[in-house]
Amino acid sequence: MSLLELLVAIALVAIVLTTVTRALAVGLTFDVQSQTTRTATNERVIFEDRMTTLIQGANLHGASDYLVSPIPVKGGLVQVVPINDGLGAGSTSLVFTGTESIPPRVLGATSRDFATLNSQYGPVGSAVETALSMTPVGDAGGRTGLFLRTQCPADADLTQGGLEGLISDKLQDIRFQFYDGTQWASTWDSRSAPQKGKLPLEIQVAYLFTGDDQVHSFLVRLPLYDSTPPLVAAPATTATGSTPPPGTPGGTQ
């Protein structure tokens, strides 16, 4: 083999090795990015599923039940709003009542005495207050994110009580908006008119994770729009008892 042929062979080998190395580097980079994307997607799916399950538990079966957003703050103070305007309008907190499911350990208990079950397992099967907020009620120990507070049985104090913990430490900001069947509202209070005794038809949740520059949102449709079934008016009748035709005074439109 001549010197020229040897140099050509070495050059070809170098080119092939360079191409293979670059392809391998691109493949590894793509794999890392794909893994990161999958992890972020899984975190969002888990978060949205958990939020959907919690919010769909809201109901107004009792006279003292409620759904309020934003959560009133004890002492008349204003809640701290996260520094981010990318999510637009909406409340940063939500509190509502729902019916707590009875744990399997209670169903399997040998005793059927109500007082005994409550002393062993705490109040079960009663109204539970659920609060979602970026502002903790108690001492969070420097932790930040979205806090979940539950209290059973629920009381009329929406500002405190129960047990509190982080539902997500990756959340940087969140907004709740409410659809009443006609328009969207940034706040909701089922204790006073015009929303008294009503649940929103849908709740839109927009959120932003730390380190993510994209705002994500999803809709939660509540199983009940109103705490009481709508009244169905009976057809109007004339003096003779017959139903007038549509379009006439007293007739069906």
Image (tube, helix red, strand yellow):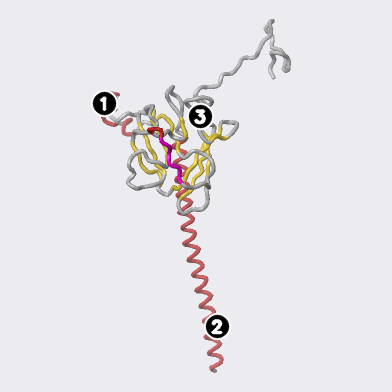
Q: Secondary structure at mark 1?
A: helix
Rendered location of residue 24, percent (x, y)? 49, 70
* N-terminal label among 2 and 1: 2
Residue 113 relative to residue 233: left or right: left
Most common secondary structure along the magenta stretch: loop
Q: Residue at x 50, y 29 (%)?
A: 199
Q: Position of residue 95 (x, y in %)?
A: 43, 34
| Residue 127 placement, left or right of 248 | left
Using the numbered discs, state the Cα–Cα distance from disc 3 to disc 1 in whole angstroms.
35 Å
Which residue is at 32% across, 28% downward? 123
Magenta run includes residue 39: no
Callout 3 secondary element: loop
The numbered dot on residue 116 is 1
Q: Position of residue 96 (x, y in %)?
A: 44, 32
Whether pointer 3 and pointer 2 mark residues with C-beta atoms closer than 8 Å, the reply is no
- Number of marks in picture: 3
User: Looking at the picture, does residue 9 appear above or below residue 206?
Assistant: below
Q: Nearer the viewer, mark 3 or mark 2?
A: 3
Q: Residues within 10 Å of mark 2 (few under 14, many from 20)?
A: few
Q: Return the residue nearer the eye: 183 or 251.
A: 183
Rendered residue at 49%/45% (across/down): 207
Labels 3 and 1: the sequence-earlier one:
1
Query: CA–CA distance between discs 2 and 1?
Result: 84 Å
Q: Which mark is residue 144?
A: none
Q: Which residue is mark 2?
A: 12
Q: Report which residue position mark 3 lands on.
A: 199
